[in-house]
Image (spheres, rainbow, N blue to C red):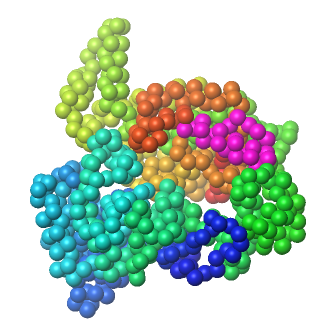
Amino acid sequence: MSAPSSRTASSPIYRGPLPHVTTVERIPVTVYAEPGDASRAVAREIVDLVRQRAEAGKKTVLGLATGSTPVGVYEELIRLHREEGVSFKSVVTFNLDEYWPMQPDELQSYRRFMREHLFDHVDILEEAIHIPDGTLGRTDLAKACAAYEEQIREAGGIDLQVLGIGRTGHIGFNEPGSPLDSRTRLITLDGVTRADAASDFFGEWNVPRQAITMGVGTILDAKRVVLLAFGEHKAPIVRKAVEEPPCSHVSASALQQHPDARFVLDRAAAARLSRFETPWLLGPLDSMGLEWTAGLTKRAVIWLSQQRQKPILKLTDADYNEHGLQELLSCRGRAYDINIEVFRAMQATISGWPGGKAAASQPGRQAEPFPKRVVVFSPHPDDDVISMGGTLIRLCEQGHDVHVAYQTSGNIAVWDESADRHVDFVEEFCRAFGVGTKTSGIADRIRQFLKSKQAGTIDIAELQAVKGLIRRTEARAGARYSGVKAENIHFLDLPFYETGRVRKKPVGPEDVAITVKLLEQVRPHQVYAAGDLSDPHGTHRVCLGAILAALDAVRTHDWAADCRLWLYRGAWQEWEPHEIEMAVPLSPEEVLRKRMAIFKHESQKDRALFPGPNDPREFWQRAEDRNRETARLYDRLGLPEYEAIEGFVRHEF
Ligand code: F6R
């Protein structure tokens, strides 16, 4: 499903006295429900252009990006080549950028990325491929950058430029401050960009400080530009680039000045655009094909309460009238009625009995049967306690039959030193008890490998296994501490994850079959899963995909008719207050117990510091801050004041 593309600079702007509402979309934006839909549409656009030009005997010059965003486009191009015979022999490509310094065969090289994700799978001519050269010496760079520009000119200019966008607003690697007329050059990467690349390089300190990039001016010279952005982590910067006046602090905003540039987004990346966040400020709802549903009313009232810094029940007719909600007020009559409706809806989300309570049932809370069979899926071995540790403890204490299923081994996220220490422990253990003194040379092989390991080298199988075991034992300790019975702890080790690399395979039939098997074994009344959609190609999203496919496969079973799926959020984000459908309050003591459960994941203690120095908080701190903030939000809306709250959204399947 896609909303129509629109250039809304001239569409009605809210005329009331709200000073902060000054912008609407300044560039055409197309929004798709899912990244896959968007990728297929852009791939089709590329192929149409290539075919059209080939028929006219012309070459097509494509400007290409790397990173997670365009991967789906490249997959679709490969499919179209294989299944529809699309040829790339008439295509010339110029990549936006490359890390510097960088050898072409290194895991993180963009040259290697392009070969693996596109070039090795289509019939493009080797000599038609251009990628900035990361092997050059510093003194040769300026000349090589000028030559790159010249090559683009000689090829006739770029016909279609594909872009992603970084959280700094960069296109290519044009970090904040890049002039509009900048050309291909060496640039120093922003701290945020290096933090975002950290997992590809097994640590931020391994990320190169510099890169060669086409300039903003080079990109603006392309005849057509399509910028793709997926995932809610892109939503704030997308809003800036689309709705705020162009400035050199957000390079992507320069595209507003291009005659044929377009943003192509999924719903998550579009979520902060005014038309989704506060559509009532842009004009009458029916002019946008919207109506005042219960959901939109709830959203608007929470927004108003936050704007006015007043609890919901204290909002007045004047508050509605003077803050862009005249239409809602006039169709409903009185602030009082709207307030009560939304207040009650929010109140009904609060439940200290996440599995339901037979005696005092709440609407929609599925009180019967009691106790329930519950499966908590955890993408990595610690997401269960980080994201819903309080709820997990409550479910166990309230007598439900709780199972936890760890979907992946999580071995990538264990430091080498930690593995080394555990190997040391095993050797000491064997010596101390005179057992298994022969470790079959495994310990030696691991130590030998670690000695010569370069940043980014794939671990040998034994080391991967040790790292997986460390996480497995920590997960067991965390789950047991939360009250889960030993026999209810499951390790699925889904195959999509086991590449030994940060880059994973897509979810496959085997992953789904393993998940189906567990569901059939437990026949749950409730399923909890990570609904963390931030990274379109991230592990959490793939894990959710496996669960949804598995639930689809079992939907005809009797037990599945009563099964409910609740989504929690990961360590990095929380649901918006208007989205939360179940709010599980935590007492101060429960917050501490949740913290203790997270502490069982010793190998992860300093992992949350990994993204960079901007946010030096550990996982337990992030989780507590997040849960406390949700509780504060409820309090400010005039609902009961709790120490912390874990939020969930129900997902229909
Ligand atoms: C990559 C590039 C960058 C990325 C951007 C988004 O060649 O030029 O601008 O497009 O950093 O990266 P992802 O897609 O990984 O979020």
User: The magenta stretch spans which residues?
Assistant: 622-644
Please, is residue 50 above or below residue 177 in the view? Answer: below
Front residue (pair 584, 379):
584
* Residue 607: quadrant of the picture: top left
Let me know if residue 190 is in the magenta part.
Answer: no
Front residue (pair 205, 458):
205
Residue 498: % across, % down: 37, 44
Please, is residue 432 above or below residue 443 in the view? Answer: above
Residue 238: % across, % down: 49, 64
Is 140 situated left or right of 100 in this image? left
Is 487 situated left or right of 612 in this image? right
Residue drawn at 31 percent across, 9 percent down: 431
Is 506 situated left or right of 596 in this image? left
- The overriding secondary structure of the stretch rendered in magenta is helix
Residue drawn at 27 percent across, 20 percent down: 439
Residue drawn at 49 percent across, 36 percent down: 617
In which quadrant of the rendered image does the N terminus lie?
Answer: bottom right
Name of the residue lying farthest toward the bottom: 56
Residue 642: % across, % down: 74, 37
In which quadrant of the rendered image does the C terminus lie?
Answer: bottom right
Please, is residue 101 above or below residue 33 in the view? Answer: above
Q: Does residue 600 show up?
A: yes
Let me know if residue 625 is in the magenta part.
Answer: yes
Residue drawn at 67 percent across, 55 percent down: 579
